[in-house]
Image (spheres, rainbow, N blue to C red):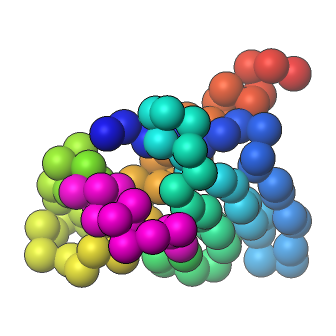
Amino acid sequence: MTFHIDPSSIAFLETRRGINATATIVSEEGVKIGRVDDIAERIVADVTFVSAAARSAFIEQARRVNPVVLGRADHNDDVFASEFARALLADAEKILLSRL
């Protein structure tokens, strides 16, 4: 299963510490499976899922796509989910900016 972020769901909030982003994660079928809250000053983005099965599928793909994060392969699942969600968010931001 592949995942992406809906570019139209991205919301930015500028704070004194940087720019935060929130967006919806969807499956290849277009079903909402979760949400990423990327806060500028945090090392790990918050990623929440609608179900345990969605979380499991997302993390499985995250570990397959990016087996080493921050130079290590032994992180917990939250770190892999965070980095994968941030990569998807970056791709969605490029799509959003190309539409302007």
Q: Is residue 66 visible?
A: no
Q: Nearer the viewer, residue 64 or 13?
A: 64
79 lies above or below 62? below
Q: Which residues are magenta?
A: 48-60
| As drawn, 9 above or below 50 | above
**Residue 54: image x %, image y %?**
39, 61
Residue 56 location in percent, x, y? 29, 65
Residue at 71% across, 61% down: 22
The image shows a total of numbered marks equal to 0
Left or right position of 32 against 75? right
Left or right: 36, with 52 as reference point: right
Queried whether the magenta region covers residue 54, the answer comes back as: yes
Percent from the top left, x then y, of residue 30?
Answer: 57, 36
Rendered location of residue 29, percent (x, y): 49, 33
- Which of the 4 image quadrants contains residue 78? bottom left
Q: Nearer the viewer, residue 52 or 59?
A: 52
The N terminus appears in which quarter of the rendering?
Answer: top left
Most common secondary structure along the magenta stretch: helix
Q: Quadrant of residue 14?
A: bottom right
Residue 28 sits inside the magenta stretch: no
Position of residue 33 in the picture relative to residue 77 (left or right): right
Give the residue drawn at x 74%, y 19%.
98
* x 52%, y 56%: residue: 33
**Who's the residue at 65% across and 53% down the image?**
24
Horizontal placement of 72 versus 57: left or right?
A: left
Residue 6 position (above or below residue 50): above
